[in-house]
Image (cartoon, rainbow, N blue to C red):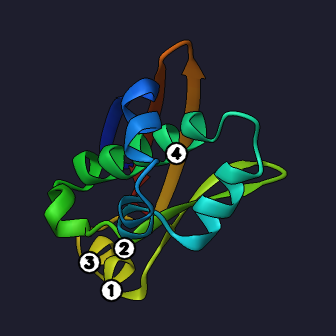
Amino acid sequence: MIAGIGTDMCQVSRMRKAALSEYFLKRVFSEEEIGYARSKCEPERHFASAFAAKEALAKASGLGMFGIGLAGSWVRRTENGPVMMFSDELLSRLRELGAGRCWLSLTHEGDYALAFVVLESVG
C-alpha cells in the first residue's frame, strides 16, 4: 500500500549558481552526492536532481524539509538506478509513519530536474 507520494522540480541554472558555494554544497549534499555530481560533465544537473529528491521525500513523508533535515537523506546512484538513503534517525521516523520502502525516479531535461518519490508501507 502507498504511504506517501511526493514530487519536486529544481531549476538546473539555479543550482549551477548555488553550487559555486562550497559551504552550500557541504550543507545540502553528502560527500557521496558531491563526488558523483562532480564526476559528471554537468554536475549541476545531478545536484539539482538530488535536491529535488530530498524535497520530494519531504513531501511524500509529510515531514517537510525541516523534518527530514538536509543531511537525513541522500541519493545513491546504483547500477539499477538511483536509491534514496536515510540516516538512522530519519529511517526510524519513516518507519513510525508506516513507510517500509522508498521508490525514487529522477530525470532532467533542459533547465529542469525532476524527482518522484513513492513511500510504500510493508506488512
Q: Residue furthest right?
A: 79
Identify the residue position indicated by label 3 in the image: 93
Q: Nearer the viewer, mark 3 or mark 1?
A: 1
Query: Which of the two discs, 4 and 2, labels the residue nearer the N terminus?
Result: 4
Please determine whether, in this image, residue 38 is positioned above or below residue 44.
below
Inter-mark Cα distance, 4 to 2: 16 Å
Label at residue 89: 1
Determine whether 17 is above or below 63 in the image. above
Element carrying mark 4: helix
Disc 1 element: helix
> Gap in Å between the C-alphas at discs 3 and 1?
6 Å
Q: Residues within 10 Å of mark 1 (few under 14, many from 20)?
A: few
Q: What residue is disc 4 on?
A: 47
Label 3 with label 1: CB-CB less than 8 Å: yes
Indicate left or right for 84 with 67 as reference: right
What amino acid does circle 3 point to?
A: Arg
Identify the mark at residue 72; answer none if there is no mark: 2
Badge 2 element? loop
45 horizontally vs 14: left or right = right
Residues packed near mark 4 inside 10 Å, few (<14), some (14 to 19) or many (20 plus):
many
Q: Residue at x 37, y 52 (%)?
A: 54
Whether the residues at callouts 1 and 2 have beta carbons within 8 Å, the answer is yes
Sequence order check, earlier mark of 1 and 2? 2
Q: CA distance from mark 4 to mark 3?
A: 25 Å
